[in-house]
Image (cartoon, grey):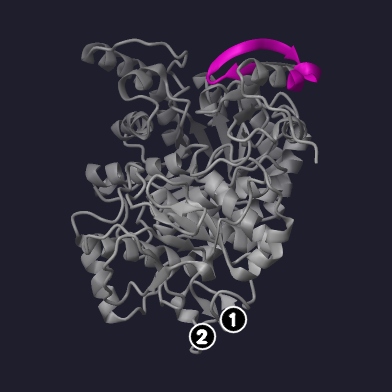
Amino acid sequence: MRYCESPYFFQRRKTREIVIGDPACGGVIIGGNHPVVKQSMITCDTMDTALSVQQTLDLVAVGCQIVRITAPTVKDAANLENIVRELRAQNCFVPIVADIHFKPEAALEAVKWVEVVRVNPGNYADTKKFAIKEYSDGQYAEELKRIEEKFAPLVLEAKRLKRCLRIGTNHGSLSDRIMNRFGDSPLGMIESALEFASICRQHDFHDFKFSMKSSNPKVMIECYRLLVARLNELGADWNYPIHLGVTEAGEGEDGRIKSAIGIGSLLCDGLGDTIRVSLTEDSPHEIPVCNDLISLIPKLTVAANVNSRTQADLRALTSAATGPFDPFHFERRATPEIALNETVKGGGEQLIRVVVTRATWDKVAPKIRPKDDVRPEAVYEDLNVAELDPTQDFEINCETQLVTVKDGVKLPAITAFRLLAAKLKRLGRNNPILLKDCINFEGGRVCENADFVAAKPPIHLGGYEPLPPNLALLQAGVVIGSLLADGIGDAILVRGESGAGLSLRLAYNILQAAGCRSFKTDYVACPSCGRTLFNLQTVTARIKARTEHLKGVKIAIMGCIVNGPGEMADADFGYVGGAPNKINLYVGKQAIKFNIPEAEAVERLVDLIKEHGKWVEPEVH
């Protein structure tokens, strides 16, 4: 199975075009050769027409091209008529997506007024009660027939009104039927979406796109790759567009890094027609991150003018039966364990290590306290590291030799490190690899596109002008995160961030976001919408203030029962809006405490963490 033309060459996936709204006055065309489209979601109550209109206008003002609005009930769906009418009266023709979960009748109302209806197969016309049941083939077929009876009316109405659909499955919100047959897995997500797509095709309806979202970037990447590979197997006319997003990414640097890993890596592989960066912040903050991610992709993908020998190597590796990693199942590349210095080992079963330059070490070392988790583990200049040019032939006689890509190689970093891993595999070597967020420089400035590499020798390690912080963070997340998601990498070095302390913490945050190390509390927080039953930003800050010292604990903060408990996925504890001013607390996916007054809920969450032996008192500095 193949999910892209090549893991070494960038070639955007060819998808069918879908027209959403009127492109002449604010609508968009997705797919084909059209630019990637940016999407976001308003956060207010859908019944508040004025605020819904204002939040939509605010999003459009910063460049949002598709706006999603939740419609949990028929009453909410009916009010979309008023919202859309007021927007059009103000000359705003941005396409509107109605977000539907549990109620097919709400979808049939919403499709009258909006350009797109999003359905989640795990909730729409199916059940999710975490029930265990064995289905015979006959029973399974009967369930599919029942689902078609509920979904087909929406398909026919969308076809009649020339609307579009988004078939969006989410990790953790699969139906009991899918869970019992496929488990809570990428394969289950794919099969769930394909069932609904097949119903669309039975009625000759093709104006739909897919999404496969997860709060875990590695799971999200696997899902999209597997989806596209399955679509390719099904035939050329299954070339439906793809919407990318890491759901419940969180806020601040963590949310941006998770999105960079998940969305950025897939964009670099040529996948994705629309994107959304889901942040637990005001929605307009999401669009600049979308812009930055899209702008980075040309710089982080292979240039067409690499020399003929390198092109031949890349083509040969592309056509090889096996590559340097399995794109559909994460497995860390096997390497021998080695000593990086007198106290730290890498490779093998060791943690992925954080390396810094001598200049960074000199700045941060005096500030490190004995119990600090964020600390340099090795200095680049002190390492016995072989700097290799994967575009040339090389020999490695010892598998315990740490290797990396040489600065100045005329390839983007992702391609260069994948090529290095592939050539090592071809030589029968499993040397540990040190990853870098950048290997090329433009006249002293970080630049991944070989077209712009300066003729003069690149500056080695220090002394170059760094990227702006917003781009440095995303570039490091895309480059290092993509490779870690491939299973490649035993140590990492971040150089694109200007501040020494910032670059060190960024390295650890990337490892945490990629699921490689846990040095702090991990939060899964939904981005808020009209279903949310409390102020997510305020509550998230309150929970963080009480729990951010709990290393290795994962806490989900969900605004409503749509996103919790299912989409909390593998969180240890959950804080979920159950009713207005009432909170339900979860351990895993099991509700333990119900209808707790919001004023007490954070402390009750702390009590629950204590009951399960996960609490430690914060240190007083």
Residue 589 drawn at (x, y percent): 53, 19
Q: Quadrant of residue 206?
A: top left
Image side of residue 415 versus residue 118, left or right = left
In the picture as drawn, the residue positioned furthest to the front comes out as: 342
Residue at x-position 47% and y-position 27%: 172
- 10 Å neighbourhood of mark 1: few (<14), some, or many (≥20)? some
Residue 168 drawn at (x, y percent): 46, 35
Residues at badges 2 and 1 in contact (C-beta under 8 Å)? yes
What stretch of residues is rendered in magenta? 585-603
510 in relation to 301, above or below = above
Of callouts 2 and 1, the N-terminal one:
1
* Of 511 and 523, the residue lying toward us: 511
* Of 494 and 527, the residue lying toward us: 494
Residue 262 drawn at (x, y percent): 49, 48
- 10 Å neighbourhood of mark 2: few (<14), some, or many (≥20)? some
Q: Amino acid at mark 1?
A: Gly
Image side of residue 209 versus residue 474, left or right = left
Separation of marks 2 and 1 at Cα, in angstroms? 8 Å
Q: Quadrant of residue 189?
A: top left
**Residue 454 has which mark?**
2
In the picture as drawn, the residue positioned furthest to the left comes out as: 321
- Is residue 36 visible from the viewing direction of this image? no
Tell me the SS state at disc 2: loop
253 in relation to 412, above or below = above
Q: Quadrant of residue 56?
A: top right
The residue singled out by tag 1 in the image is 444
Image side of residue 391 versus residue 281, left or right = left
Residue 87 drawn at (x, y percent): 70, 43
Image side of residue 620 versus residue 502, left or right = right
* Of 588 and 584, the residue lying toward us: 588
